[in-house]
Amino acid sequence: MAAEYCVIMAGGKGERFWPCSREETPKQLLNIFGDATLIEQTVLRLFPLIPFENILIVTNGKYVDKMRMLLPQLPADNIIGEPCGRDTAPCVALAAGVIKAKSGTEDAVMLLLPSDHCIHAVSNLQKDLKSCCELARKSPSLITIGIPPTFPSSDYGYIECGEKIGEQAYRVRKFVEKPSAERAAEMLSAGNYKWNSGMFVWKVGTVLDIMRRHAPDLADLSAVLEKAWHDGSFRETLAAEYGKCRKISIDYAVMEKAENIIVLDASFDWDDIGNWTALSHHFQADKSGNVVVGKFESLNSNGCIVFSDVPEHLLCAIDMNDSVIVHTRDVTLFCPKNSTPRIKELLKILAEKPDMKKHF
C-alpha cells in the first residue's frame, strides 16, 4: 500500500495578527497559543499518524531556515521555500510533484493542512484524518473536513452537504465563500452546512488528473518539478518556473471543477486563529470579561482582548469596552473587536509611508 504524506501550507504573513506577526516572524512562527509555535504544533499533532520523513512544509523562502531550526525532526529538504507567493493551487502542484518523486507512485495519499489552526483533541483529529485517507484510497474522490458550525460566522467559508454516504460523510453540493451575517444565520438554521476547514485529502493521481483536465499548466508544473527532484535540479527549476505560474487558489483551480467531493464531519475542536479575537477562545476571561496576556489594570473596562509581549510593560484602560489592545516593543494597536479585519487596510496605508517600513 502506497504511503501517506502530509503537506503543510505555511507561506502566509498572518497580517491580521499584526503587530506581533511581521514579515520576518509571521503568525505560524509565533507561540501565542502555547509553549510551541503554531507550525510546531501542527507538525507534532500529526505524529505518529504521519512519520516525520513524510511531512512536507511549503513556505515562503525567507522562512525556510527558521522552520528548519524549529523542526529538526523533519528532513531539511522537506521544508520547501516558494520563490514567490502564488496562492494554494501552485503550492499543491509543487507538493504533488515532490510526493510523486519521493513515493514513486500516484497512489500515494496526500493530506493538505494549513499551518495556523488550533486543535486540542489530537486523537480525534488523527482518527478523522485516517478515515479520510481510507476514503481517498477507495475511490478517486477529493475529501475535505467540515466543522459543525456553532454560531453564524461571517469569517469562515462554508460547505453545503448533500447525500449522506456514511456515519460521518456527505456528498458536497457546493462551497460557499464567506457570507454576510444574515446569510450565515440562514445557513446555520438550514442545518446542512459546515465550516470549511481548509483541510483536504486525496491520492496524488486524483488531484493531478483534475489538473490535467482543468488546469494543465499546474499539471505541467508538477511534472517538471517531479523530474527536477529526481535529477537534482529542484531548487534551480523551482526558482525558474514557479514565478511563471498564475496566482490561483485550490478552490478555484480544482474544487469548483471536481464532481466527486466528500466532506467528513469533524469530531475534533477547531479554531483557525483568524485574528486577535481568537484569544477569547483559548484564554480564561477575568470577571469583567477581559482576556489578558501580559500586565493589565483597568477601570470600568469590559470584554476587551489585551496582549503584550513586553513583560515589564503595564497596560491600563479606563471605560474601554469590546476593544483589542496589543502592545509590542515598537507598536501599540487599539481597535474595536469588530474592526480587527481592517488591520490589513491599515497596513496598506502604512506601506505607503517610507518611515513605517521598520514596523512591518
Image (cartoon, rainbow, N blue to C red):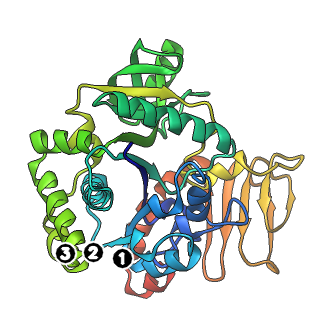
**Upstream in sequence: badge 3 or badge 1:** 1
Determine whether 165 is above or below 113 in the image.
Answer: above
Q: Position of residue 25 (x, y in %)?
A: 52, 75
Q: Position of residue 143 (x, y in %)?
A: 38, 33
Q: Which mark is residue 155?
A: none
For this orientation, the residue located farthest to the right is: 287
Instruction: Name the residue tied to disc 1.
Output: 61
Within-10-Å neighbours for mark 3: few <14, some 14–19, many 20+:
few
**Residue type, numbered disc 1:** Gly
Within-10-Å neighbours for mark 1: few <14, some 14–19, many 20+:
some
**Residue type, numbered disc 3:** Asp
- Does the rendering let one see residue 347? yes
Instruction: Name the residue tied to disc 2.
Output: 83
Q: Quadrant of residue 152?
A: top right
Q: Report if the CB atoms under discs 2 and 3 are less than 8 Å apart.
A: no
Rendered residue at 38%/86% (across/down): 354
User: Tag 2's secondary structure?
Assistant: loop
* Closer-to-camera residue (170/222): 222
User: Tag 1's secondary structure?
Assistant: helix
Instruction: Name the residue tied to disc 3.
Output: 231
* Closer-to-camera residue (122/16): 122
Which quarter of the rendering shows the N terminus? top left
Rendered residue at 51%/69% (across/down): 74
Label 3 or label 1, whichever lies nearer to me, is: 3
* Closer-to-camera residue (315/192): 192
**Upstream in sequence: badge 2 or badge 3:** 2
